[in-house]
């Protein structure tokens, strides 16, 4: 069993003030099975604590609780390599296309329903395409330019009257590094560049374009 599971199990027992022996009795498994759980045992543990199996095995429940205490007010994402796989697709006439994951879009819409503003900051070139995607997802804050991303974000925060600590950001490349070091919570896809992984609070299990934004939102922000 991986180290994330053991850390999360210890954190859950400590936060719920229950020892592991009592937990085993409550869910009907042997104490030794907590250290070498079967798939059925893992489901019982996740159900008992009302957490997702994916988060129990791969995430950080301590970080998820920390996020809730901070109170995220603004969620911002990069586009290429995050909402997309980073590929560049062209038609025979030279028109550029981007492939977006519908699961990410559903999660972003849920943020607004929960009172969290959403935004896009991109150094991409196809402003109209990005603007159309943002419109479909009801994202009102959109910046597609070469302006440093942190400068854009600071201006947004000033307008909203919030602090950078109340911002969650996901990016994948070197132009995102400054923002990721400044915000309250930062994440990157599994295939982000190494220099960005060094600064991210969370390295997600999914790659860009493969619902990594959905993972970030579902497992850490709207837990």
Image (spheres, rainbow, N blue to C red):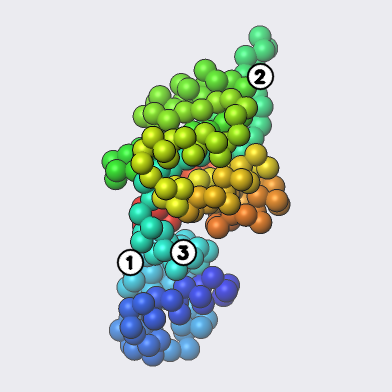
Left or right for 175, reference 139: right
In the rendered image, the residue lying farthest to the right is 194
**Viewer-nearest residue: 29 or 156:** 156
Q: Secondary structure at mark 2?
A: strand
Classify 208 as above or below 29.
Answer: above
Residue 134 position by quadrant = top left
Camera-near label (3 vs 1) is 3
**Residue 200 rendering spot, x and y as whole percentages:** 59, 54
Rendered-image quadrant of the C terminus:
bottom left
Question: Dot 1 corresponds to which residue?
Answer: 50
Q: Which mark is residue 172?
A: none
Left or right for 154, reference 69: right
Q: Residues within 10 Å of mark 3 (few under 14, many from 20)?
A: some
**Residue 71 rendering spot, x and y as whole percentages:** 35, 54
- Is residue 205 visible in the rendered structure shown here? no
- Mark 3 or mark 1, earlier in chain: 1
Question: Dot 3 corresponds to which residue?
Answer: 63
Classify 201 as above or below 189.
Answer: below
Residue at 57% across, 31% down: 122
Q: Secondary structure at mark 1?
A: loop
**Viewer-nearest residue: 51 or 75:** 75
- Mark 2 or mark 3, earlier in chain: 3
Classify 14 as above or below 202.
Answer: below
**Viewer-nearest residue: 218 or 67:** 67
Question: Dot 2 corresponds to which residue?
Answer: 90
Residue at 58% across, 72% down: 2
In the rendered image, the residue lying farthest to the top is 93
**Residue 156 rendering spot, x and y as whole percentages:** 44, 35
Q: Are marks 1 and 2 in contact (CB under 8 Å)?
A: no
Real-space Cα distance between discs 3 and 1? 16 Å
Q: Secondary structure at mark 3?
A: helix
């Amino acid at each position: 069993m991986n180290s994330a599971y053991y850390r999360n199990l210890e954190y859950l027992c400590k936060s719920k003030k229950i020892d592991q022996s009592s937990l085993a009795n409550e869910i009907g498994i042997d104490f030794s099975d907590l250290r070498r759980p079967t798939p059925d045992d893992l489901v019982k543990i996740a159900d008992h604590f009302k957490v997702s199996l994916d988060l129990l095995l791969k995430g950080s429940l301590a970080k998820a609780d920390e996020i809730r205490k901070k109170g995220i007010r603004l969620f911002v994402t990069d586009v290429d390599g995050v909402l997309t796989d980073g590929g560049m697709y062209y038609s025979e006439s030279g028109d550029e296309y981007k492939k977006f994951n519908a699961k990410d879009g559903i999660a972003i819409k849920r943020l607004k329903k929960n009172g969290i503003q959403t935004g896009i900051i991109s150094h991409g070139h196809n402003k109209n395409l990005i603007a159309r995607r943002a419109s479909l997802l009801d994202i009102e804050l959109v910046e597609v330019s070469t302006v440093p991303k942190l400068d854009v974000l600071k201006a947004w925060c000033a307008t909203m009257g919030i602090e950078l600590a109340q911002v969650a950001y996901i990016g994948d490349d070197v132009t995102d590094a400054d923002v990721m070091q400044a915000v309250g919570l930062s994440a990157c896809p599994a295939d982000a560049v190494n220099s960005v992984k060094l600064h991210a609070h969370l390295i997600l299990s999914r790659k860009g374009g493969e619902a990594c934004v959905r993972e970030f939102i579902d497992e850490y922000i709207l837990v």
